[in-house]
Image (cartoon, grey):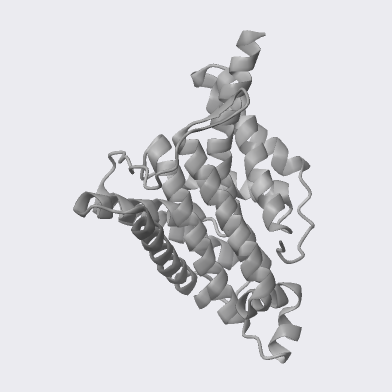
Amino acid sequence: MAALTAYAVQTVNSGLALGSVYGLMALGFSLIYNSSRLINFAQGELLLLCGLTLYSLTQAMQVSPVFALAAAGVCGYFAGCVMYSTTLGVSLQSNPLRQLMLTVAASLAWQGVAILVWGKKPLLLPRLLPIPAMSVGPFYLSADTAASLVMTLAAAGLLSLFLAKTRYGRAIRAVSMNSLAARLQGVSPAHAHALSFALAGITAALGSMAVGPQTMLRYDMGLGLGLKGFVAASLGGYVSVWKVVAGGAVLGLIEAALVLAFSAELKETLIYALLIGLLVLTKNDQTRPAKA
């Protein structure tokens, strides 16, 4: 019984740490997909470059929590805008396959930029939010897990309010429901697409603050995180902000359980086999706009 309890405690702690990152990634996928019907396979590179930029800031100066959040937001916003201007922004009238391949090309190009500027050595991003460890009954959440969970829940809550209560958020939802009707009402689909990319960049930057202190930042981590964020968004159905975040949590818990139950040599094979099964079984026909 004691061993089972310890297994459950470790699974929850590790699973929520992973799931928080996947949830933030999934929010970015959901935003972009709902506004433009585009799967952005460079979402992982947004996280990587924002995290490496934050790392450089921490090496150059003392970074307070408020400054770290502001820097992550600014970095993510502009990175998302650059991503839009080099992918969907130059191919609005192109077929979906060309748009998709542009995001793949952007992913490879941005990975090259990361190698040229920061090299291939893994870099540890310090924990920038002073959130203490938490205990809930027999379950224990480390400081890194607690910080990741708080950032994810806060991002989901603020994004829900933004989409439901602000003019720009309602514009994104209008374009998602019917682009032509939104245009006739004076809403610019291009502006809605660009804003979705910018918001996705912010969620990716928060994801870098969550994953950097846990696993370090590596030049080749973007594809794996992006793929798992895509699956988390698929689990959540792309419809609801909270369901998408829940999809990330579920995926993180499953992955943590597999890692603890099997040897390290088998974990990646089992995890990606699971992802293939989830992609095959998950229905992706829910294409209504994201909501709270």
Placement of the N terminus among the 4 image quadrants: top right
Count all numbered tags in the image, as a single digit. Answer: 0
Q: Where's residue 204, x and y in %?
A: 48, 55
Q: Residue furthest left?
A: 60
* Side of 124 where 291 appears, left or right: right
Q: Nearer the viewer, residue 141 or 213?
A: 141
Residue occupying image coordinates x 29% and y 53%: 63
Residue at left offset 30%, top offset 41%: 123
Residue 63, above or below 215: below
Q: Quadrant of residue 171 in the image?
A: bottom right
In the rendered view of the protein, which quadrant contains the C terminus? bottom right
Q: From where the camera sits, is residue 273 visible?
A: no
Left or right of 189? Residue 54 is left
Give the percent coordinates (x, y) of residue 147: 48, 43
Q: Is residue 53 above or below residue 289?
A: above
Question: Which residue occupies the foreground of this view, 206 or 277?
Answer: 206
Q: Residue 108: x, y in percent?
A: 42, 54
Q: Residue at x 63, y 74 (%)?
A: 169
- Report whether 13 appears left or right of 117: right
